[in-house]
Amino acid sequence: MSTTTREEWEENSLFVRETLSPLSQHFLSFWPRCFFKNSDHSAKIFFHLFEMIKYIFLLFFLFS
């Protein structure tokens, strides 16, 4: 496992945030809300799950 400096970590996290945050917003806009009775609540749950996946990817990207 390689060690990363603070500057590398900030650069990587900025890259991941700039890349994945628009993706999560874009993906949510196409999420079929008609399948749920309470669409706003379901969209919030799905968005939080996607955010968790984003941070898992960030950790994997930093420590690989």
Image (cartoon, rainbow, N blue to C red):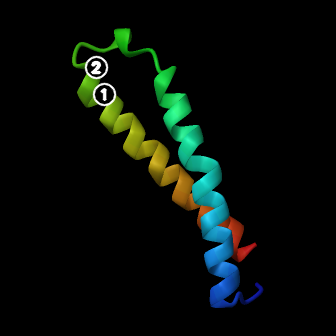
Asked if residue 59 lies left or right of residue 5, the reply is left
Asked if residue 36 lies left or right of residue 58, the reply is left
Instruction: Between residue 45 and residue 9, name the one nearer to us.
Output: 9
The N terminus: image quadrant? bottom right
Q: Quadrant of residue 13?
A: bottom right
Residue at the limit of the structure toward the top, as seen here: 34
Marks 2 and 1: in contact by CB < 8 Å?
yes
User: What's the residue type where badge 1 is placed?
Assistant: Ser
For the residue carrying disc 2, how many other residues have a C-alpha within 10 Å: few (<14), some (14-19), or many (20+)? few
Q: Which residue is mark 2?
A: 39
Q: Residue at x 61, y 66 (%)?
A: 14
Separation (CA) of disc 1 from disc 2? 5 Å
Report x, y in % for residue 43: 34, 29
- Residue 42 marker: 1
Instruction: Between residue 22 and residue 58, name the one nearer to us.
Output: 22
Q: Quadrant of residue 15?
A: bottom right
The C terminus: image quadrant? bottom right
Report x, y in % for residue 25: 49, 36
Q: Is residue 17 above or below residue 42?
A: below
